Amino acid sequence: MSKRRLNTNPDRNGYFGPYGGMYVPETLMTPLLDLGRAYQQARKDRSFREELRNYLRDFVGRPTPLYYAERMTKELGCKAVYLKREDLCHTGAHKINNSLGQALLARRMGKKRVIAETGAGQHGVATATVAAMFGMECVIYMGATDMERQALNVFRMRSLGAEVVAVTAGQKTLKEAISEAMRDWVTNVRTTHYILGSALGAHPYPRMVRDFQSIIGQETRRQIQRVAGQLPTVLLACVGGGSNSIGLFHPFINDRGVRMIGVEAGGLGLRKGQHAARFAGGNVGILQGTKTFVLQDRHGQIQLTHSVSAGLDYAAIGPEHSLLRDLGRVEYVHVNDVEAVEAFDTLGQWEGLLPALETAHAVAYMIKMAGRWEKRDVLVLNLSGRGDKDVQQVAAWKKERAR
C-alpha cells in the first residue's frame, strides 16, 4: 500500500476509483443531481451543521460512550478492548445518525414525505422516528421475511405513525425492499425524499451516508486518545451495506498504524445462496444504482443470500468498501451464523451487553482471534446496535437447532 495520503472521496460522477456511479433510470437522474447539489450546499452551511449537531446531542444522545470492556480484554489477551456504544443512541442503533441528517436535508428541500427501506428494522424505526418529530408522512418498505423475524421493530414503526409495506417479491428481504422504495421514489419524486439507510446506491448516497455516520469515528478518535493516550491499533465493525463500518473507519483512513477489519456474513457457509460475504464469493457488478462487489452468477443474475441477521442479508456492499479493499486499507473477513449467535451470548455473559445480531458478527471475529491479538493491541469495536430486536429470533434459532 502506498504511503501517500488517501483520498477516498468520490469524483464528480460519484465514483470511488472504479466503483460507484449513478446506474439508475433516466427519471431519477435529475432528482439525484438535485439531491447532490442540495447536500453540497447544506454541508457547507453553518446553520445546517449546527442544527444537526444540536439534534444529535439533545435528541439522539451523542456523544455515545467509549466503554472499556474489562472482562473481554482479559479473555482476548490484548492491551485493551473498547466498545463504541452506538447501541445507546435513541432508537437503539447507529442508523438514526443518518436518518436525522437526511430528514433535515429533506425538510430543507421542501419535501414533506419520506420513504425508506429496512432489513433488520433499525433504519425503518430511525426514519419513522425522525419523520414523526418533523411531522412528515412516512412509508417504510420491508421484506415479508424480515417482517416476520423483526416483528418488534414493525410494531415500533407503526406505533410511530409510519406505514409499513410488506414486500413479497423475490426473496422477500432487503434487496426487494430497496427495489420497492426506488419504484415509489420514481413515482413520487416531486414530494418525496428517499432516506436510503446504508452507504449504498447511486451517487450522492454513499458519500452522504458516510458523512452523516462519520460522527462515530470522529468521536472515537477523540475519546480513545483521552482514555488510552493513543490511537487504536485495530478497529472492527460488521459490514452489511457498510454504513456503521465506514462511519467508524473513515476518520482513521490515513492513520497507517490503525488496522481496520470489516466482518461480513458467512451465513451457512460459502456455498451459492447460503451467505452474504460479497468479497469472499462475489465479483464486480451493478446492483440498485451502484457498481461494486456483488453476489451474482456468471450471467450477472443476482444470487440469493442468507444470514441469521437481516441487516447483513444483502447481495452488494457499499462502493467505498470495494475501493478500500482494493487499496488493502481494510481487511474483510466473514463469520458464520453459529459463530455470530454464540458471540451474541458471549458478549452478554462477559460484559452484560446483548449486541444486535449484525454487530455479533464483529464480536465473533474478535473472539475467534483470541490469543492471536498482540499484547500491545488496543481494539475498538463498533457496537452498532443492541440486541433487543433479536432476542425472539435467537430463541427460535436455538430451538430449531436443538431439534
Image (spheres, rainbow, N blue to C red):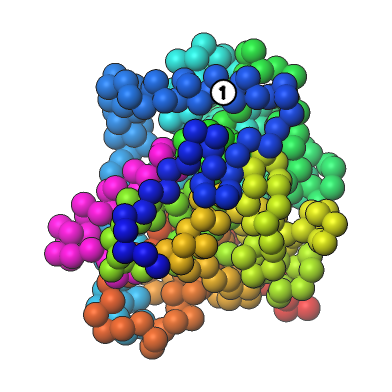
Q: Amino acid at mark 1?
A: Leu
* x 81%, y 61%: residue: 297
Q: Kindly report the secondary structure that dominates the magenta region of the rendered protein.
A: helix
Q: Please determine whether, in this image, residue 190 is positioned above or below residue 130.
A: above
Q: Residue at x 54, y 37 (%)?
A: 14
For the residue pair 372 and 132, the one nearer the viewer reads as: 372
Please name the residue shown 36% across and 27% down the image.
43
Q: Position of residue 393 (x, y in %)?
A: 66, 60
Residue 78 location (% of width, % of height): 29, 80
Whether residue 59 sits left or right of residue 285 in the image: it is left
Residue drawn at x 75%, y 34% is: 180
Is 210 in the magenta? yes
Q: Is residue 50 visible?
A: yes
Compared with 122, 347 (above or below) is below
Please identify the quarter of the rendering in which residue 395 is found.
Answer: bottom right
Q: Can residue 114 be seen from the camera position used here? A: no
Q: Secondary structure at mark 1?
A: helix
Give the residues drawn in magenta, as a range.
Answer: 209-234
Determine whether 29 is above or below 346 in the image.
above
**Quadrant in the picture for the C terminus:** bottom right
Residue, disc 1: 33
